[in-house]
Amino acid sequence: MKRLIILALALLAFPVTSAVAAVPNMTCRAEGKAVGGPALHQYDTTDVFRFAAGKLYHRWSGREEYFYNDISEVQLGRYVSGHMTFVLDYDNRSGYVVIAANPDWTVYNLNCKP
């Protein structure tokens, strides 16, 4: 019992850190057709999203890369930055992003690489 109390006190002495991991550095390219609304439509996309040091950068054909916003992981494989929510698979290789700014929304399928 005494050992258990000592162990508990020792564990309390260390600061508790977040269970959420750091955002990985990677680049995600939109693939296929983007779907948007509220009037449902599809269109070709050239969007590229780059995650670097907790920041999100965005570019597309005809637009130079620009800093969009800070990005953070809110759940395993789910990242949020401004109006964008990224949902990625277990190894962060594919997924989708939803961009929702009332009243418009767009969904892009993604292919990601470190």
Image: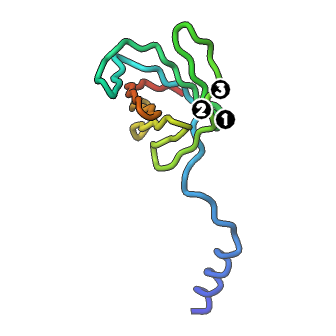
Q: Residue at x 53, y 24 (%)?
A: 49
Residue 95 occupies quadrant: top left
Which residue lies under the disc numbered 2?
25
For marks 2 and 1, give the CA distance. 7 Å
Labelled disc at residue 53: 1
For marks 1 and 3, give the CA distance. 12 Å
Left or right of 69? Residue 93 is left
Residue that extends furthest to the bottom in the rendered view of this protein = 1
Query: Is label 2 in contact with label 1 (beta carbons under 8 Å)?
Result: yes
Which residue lies under the disc numbered 3?
67
Q: Residue at x 41, y 41 (%)?
A: 90
Q: Looking at the image, is mark 1 or mark 3 nearer the viewer?
A: 3
Assess disc 1: are there few (<14), some (14-19) or many (≥20) residues with their C-alpha within 10 Å of its C-alpha: few
Q: First in sequence, mark 1 or 3: give its number.
A: 1
The three-letter code of the residue at mark 2 reads: Asn
Q: Residue at x 42, y 24 (%)?
A: 111
For marks 3 and 2, give the CA distance. 14 Å
- Residue 5 vertical position relative to residue 72 in the rendered view, above or below: below
Assess disc 3: are there few (<14), some (14-19) or many (≥20) residues with their C-alpha within 10 Å of its C-alpha: few
Q: First in sequence, mark 2 or 1: give its number.
A: 2
Q: Looking at the image, is mark 3 or mark 2 nearer the viewer?
A: 3
Residue that extends furthest to the top in the rendered view of this protein = 62
Q: In the structure shown, which secondary structural element does the residue marked by tag 1 occupy?
A: loop
Quadrant including the C terminus: top right
Assess disc 2: are there few (<14), some (14-19) or many (≥20) residues with their C-alpha within 10 Å of its C-alpha: some
Left or right of 26? Residue 11 is right
Q: How is the image coloured?
A: rainbow
Q: Residue at x 55, y 29 (%)?
A: 26
